[in-house]
Image (cartoon, rainbow, N blue to C red):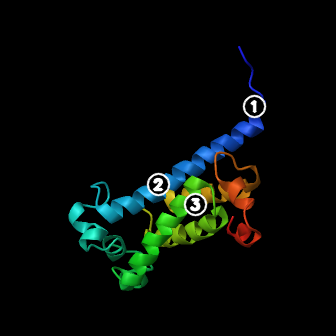
Amino acid sequence: MAQSRTKRTPESLTWYAVAAARFLLGFVFLWTFFDKLFGLHYGTSSSAAWIHGGSPTRSYLAAVHGPFAGLFHAMAGQTWVDWLFMIGIAGIGLALVLGIAVRIAVVSGTLLLLLMWAASLPIRSNPFVDEHVLYIALLWIIFFGYRHQVLSFGAWWRGGPARFRWLW
């Protein structure tokens, strides 16, 4: 039986776990994008799909009852908000799944998730922590592990033209 050429250490296995988390979190963002775009009947009905004239942000932002309700109600269903949201979740999802432009994905994902967290206040099940806070923590774990990134196109991306390296 042939032995593997690379020795698997607990540290290297940790980076594979971070890569799996990066991929899965990217899939969460991409799934949200496709569900809002096509109305796949998970979070969005077909009649409310963006391609059928629905707004990806209206129902969520219009239902806000917390301290920032006025701000979010004013943004609900605005065309520019819909476009920013859809471009944002698609870009964040693609970046995390492919392992490229991860820095930008972490920063923009953190901003998006903070806004979604603020829209969900007050949280009924916990005074502070919900899935948005957990996703933010996971994004920053991915961010600080970028030098050890495995299962991604990150190394290829960083090896490209110098003018694109800031996008990593």
- In the current view of this chain or complex, which residue is farthest to the front? 161
Residue drawn 34% across the image and 59% down it: 35
Residue, disc 1: 8
- Mark in front: 2 vs 3: 3
Quadrant in which the N terminus appears: top right
* Cα gap from disc 3 to disc 1, whole angstroms: 26 Å
Residue drawn 73% across the image and 57% down it: 144
* Cα gap from disc 2 to disc 3, whole angstroms: 12 Å
Spot occupied by residue 12 in the image (x, y as percentages of width and height): 74, 39
Residue, disc 3: 95
Q: Secondary structure at mark 3?
A: helix
Residue drawn 41% across the image and 83% down it: 80
Quadrant in which the C terminus appears: bottom right
Would you call the spot at circle 1 few (<14 residues within 10 Å), some (14-19), or many (20 or more)? few
* Cα gap from disc 2 to disc 1, whole angstroms: 29 Å
Q: Left or right of 13: which side holds 38? A: left
Give the amino acid at mark 1: Arg
The numbered mark, 3 or 1, whose residue comes first in the sequence reads 1
- In the current view of this chain or complex, which residue is farthest to the top? 1
Give the amino acid at mark 3: Ala
| Residue 125 placement: quadrant | bottom left
Inspect this view and state whether residue 133 appears. no
Spot occupied by residue 42 in the image (x, y as percentages of width and height): 31, 54
- Mark in front: 2 vs 1: 1
Would you call the spot at circle 2 few (<14 residues within 10 Å), some (14-19), or many (20 or more)? some
The label shown at residue 141 is: none
The numbered mark, 2 or 1, whose residue comes first in the sequence reads 1
Residue drawn 29% across the image and 56% down it: 40
Q: Do callouts 3 and 1 mark residues in contact (Cβ within 8 Å)?
A: no
Please state which of residues 86 and 67 is positioned toward the viewer in this rendering: 86
- Where 152 falls versus 9 (above or below)? below
Residue, disc 2: 28
